Image (cartoon, rainbow, N blue to C red):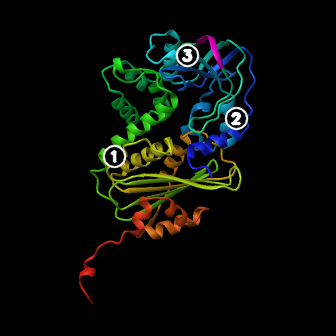
Amino acid sequence: MITSKNAYLAKLTEQIQMKSVKVGKNLEGSTPPSVFIGRWSYPKVYAGPMMVGEAGDTSIMDSPESWIGQNKQQEDIINYRMNLVRGKQLIKIDDLENPFVEKLQDISLASTSIDSEATFGKTPTGSMLSEDSMPHGPSAVIEKFDIDAVRWDKQLEKTFYDTDLKAGDAVVNLHNKDVPFSAMQKAFSVGAIGTKNKRKLVPTRWSITACDSTLADRFLKEVRKFEQLDTYRVYEFGSFNNYYIIILTPTEWQYEWYEAFIKIMYNEELIYSDYETNGGKKEYSIVGGCYYTAKMAVLDYLMKIKKQSGLIILREAYEGYVPLGVFNVRENIKEAMQKPYKEFETLEESLKYGGTKLRIPIKKYVKQGTLLNEMLHTKQTTLDMYFKK
């Protein structure tokens, strides 16, 4: 029995064999635009561009926001990602004057793909598949790197030059201007956002959760001021061997996240969960970045409809599932929130409906969780209790 989600996904990713593109020491092509910053040797980090050996518009390879809308399949995404070659150099996180880092900033602020060429110290090899980041193809230390002239995205450019604007405010502003999440996250990770003396390189994984939790916290401050929903609402969507049931409850804000992995490696049926009450969450979630990105996506929706609610999310991953990064959760949930929803008078009815769409019986989720369990078993005190019939 694997007790932590992290250990389970580490074991799963070990077993999955992925064939990455073969390239030589010299690579001519383009960057979608895409960068990756590792975290292993922090406060020095392996930072660099990701390139593909083809010219022209390759933006689809690093545009998770467009994959579901364009009906891309899991195989398409793995193919895109395994064709991306990662160049890297070991750099101090505050070395932003470094010409190589300046090129990475250029890439992250770009509005389109950029023609580029690289010379590696040795032939790039291997591939990366981890439980928390999008996969990519072979990598090697980069010795020489050149890019064509870059046209920056106007909103990102404005943010880059505003060195008095705090990073949190910048992220919210960019979101409000409809800058894609992946674009703002890249800019954040290469130190192109925030007040002048606080800018630094941030590992890709950390920058994703930082942007998600910054947005979620800001949204929640506003959502707390809105009227509560008056019924239960159930939203649903599935793609990439996942299915999501999202329940909004007519309560003040509280949130529980469940995810189940069903017969992916063997005959396993594992459920992991985490929650927060109205007071919020102090420590980092035991289920990782998925928790924050799901919370952000639903709070963004509540902001739009100007309502407050509680939130229960049930996610199932099925045979053939491959960890592709937290974008998978964010984009599936955004998609679900745009679909028509079902309304119910009680939590029991909502769960009963959800249970018709999921493979694991609802009672197993209830048993595993905390908040859902309490909501179902707390008997509301009513006036009737004080009057004997």
Q: Residue at x 48, y 34 (%)?
A: 208
Camera-nearest label, 2 or 3: 3
| Most foreground residue, 316 or 230 | 316
In the rendered view of the protein, which quadrant contains the C terminus?
bottom left
| Most foreground residue, 339 or 124 | 124
Q: Main secondary structure of the magenta part?
A: strand
Q: Residue at x 40, y 42 (%)?
A: 283
| Residue that label 1 marks | 220
Q: Is residue 18 above or below residue 281?
A: above
- In three-dimensional space, the C-alpha distance between marks 2 and 3, rounded to whole angstroms, equals 27 Å
Callout 2: SS: helix
Callout 1: SS: helix
Camera-nearest label, 1 or 2: 1
Callout 3: SS: strand
Q: Is residue 297 above or below residue 204?
A: below
- In three-dimensional space, the C-alpha distance between marks 1 and 3, rounded to whole angstroms, equals 38 Å
Farthest residue in the bottom direction?
A: 389
Q: Tag 3: Cα neighbours inside 10 Å, few (<14), some, or many (≥20)?
A: some
Q: Earlier in the sequence, mark 1 or mark 3?
A: 3
Residue type indicated by callout 1: Leu
| Residue that label 2 marks | 79
Residue type indicated by callout 3: Leu
Residue type indicated by callout 2: Asn
Q: Read off the magenta span.
A: 140-147
Q: List x then y, in percent, for residue 120.
A: 67, 13
User: Does 249 lie within the magenta span?
Assistant: no
Say whether marks 1 and 2 touch (CB < 8 Å).
no
In the picture, the disc for residue 90 is 3
Q: Earlier in the sequence, mark 1 or mark 2?
A: 2
Q: Is residue 121 above or below residue 185?
A: above
